[in-house]
Image (cartoon, rainbow, N blue to C red):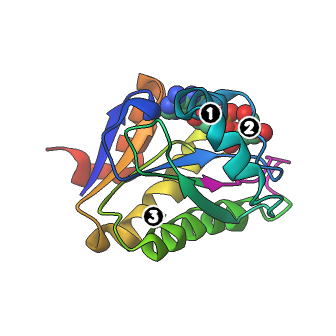
Amino acid sequence: MIEVLVADITTLDVDAIVNAANEQLRGGGGVDGAIHRAAGRELVQASRAKGPIGTGEAVITPGFELRAKYVIHAVGPVWHGGTRGEAGLLEAAYEASFTCARSAGDVRTIAFPAISAGVYGYPSDRAADIAVHAMWRHEGEYERIIACAFDERMAKLYRRAIGPRSER
Ligand code: APR
């Protein structure tokens, strides 16, 4: 079952949190900035050393000062109107995140922000739909999968994408 939470992802007590990163893995604004602030300076070194990566890809680092043991840095697409393969790239970013989580071997609980739905401009409703479908594909592999919304509006879009299954 996908859990929809409204929270600052950096505060969650989970094994891994996913970061909406950029290709350089150098930190930035939005959730990326929040994760870097909370994890401390070591994350800058660790993530930069693994970059650059392509859009749709992901890498894993320790979580350093976070409660989460790992940060999975995934790069979603910039929205260009939907004509540049954005949907496939966003799906790939989720799949790459799950691949990283599996490779760690000890991730039972994982939380995702709404990759690409901020600065990168992906329409939030469509981003929620892609996120939820990716989470459903992997739901059986985890104790908890959290769709972490930063505000109630995004949480509503996740719940709508989940449909009747979210009405508990
Ligand atoms: N916890 C959870 N969600 C958050 C947080 C937070 N602390 N801060 C922001 N968000 C939400 C935003 O509200 C948005 O719904 O994360 C979602 C993704 O927004 P962005 O962080 O802007 O990510 P994205 O659209 O993928 O853009 C990536 O932004 O900061 C840069 O380095 C990053 O260049 C990259 C780009």
Distance from disc 3 to disc 1, alpha carbons, whole Å, reads 28 Å
Between discs 2 and 3, the one toward the N terminus: 2
Tell me the residue at 51%/42% (across/down).
Answer: 113
| Image coords of residue 155 (percent x, y) | 40, 33
The type of residue carrying mark 2 is Gly
At mark 3, the secondary structure is: helix
At mark 2, the secondary structure is: loop
At mark 1, the secondary structure is: helix
The type of residue carrying mark 1 is His
State whether label 3 is within 8 Å of ligand 1. Answer: no
Q: Residue furthest left?
A: 168
**In terms of secondary structure, what is the magenta stretch mainly?**
loop
Residue 31 relative to residue 102: left or right: right
Per the rendered image, the range of residues in magenta is 73-82
The type of residue carrying mark 3 is His
Tell me the residue at 59%/27% (across/down).
Answer: 34
Judging by the rendered image, the residue that carries numbered circle 1 is 36
Between discs 2 and 1, the one toward the N terminus: 2
Whether tag 2 and tag 1 are in contact, CB under 8 A, the answer is: yes
Residue 65 relative to residue 40: left or right: left
Name the one closer to the observer, 168 or 57: 57
Residue 121 relative to residue 146: left or right: right
| Image coords of residue 66 (percent x, y) | 44, 37
For residue 15, the mark is: none
Judging by the rendered image, the residue that carries numbered circle 2 is 27
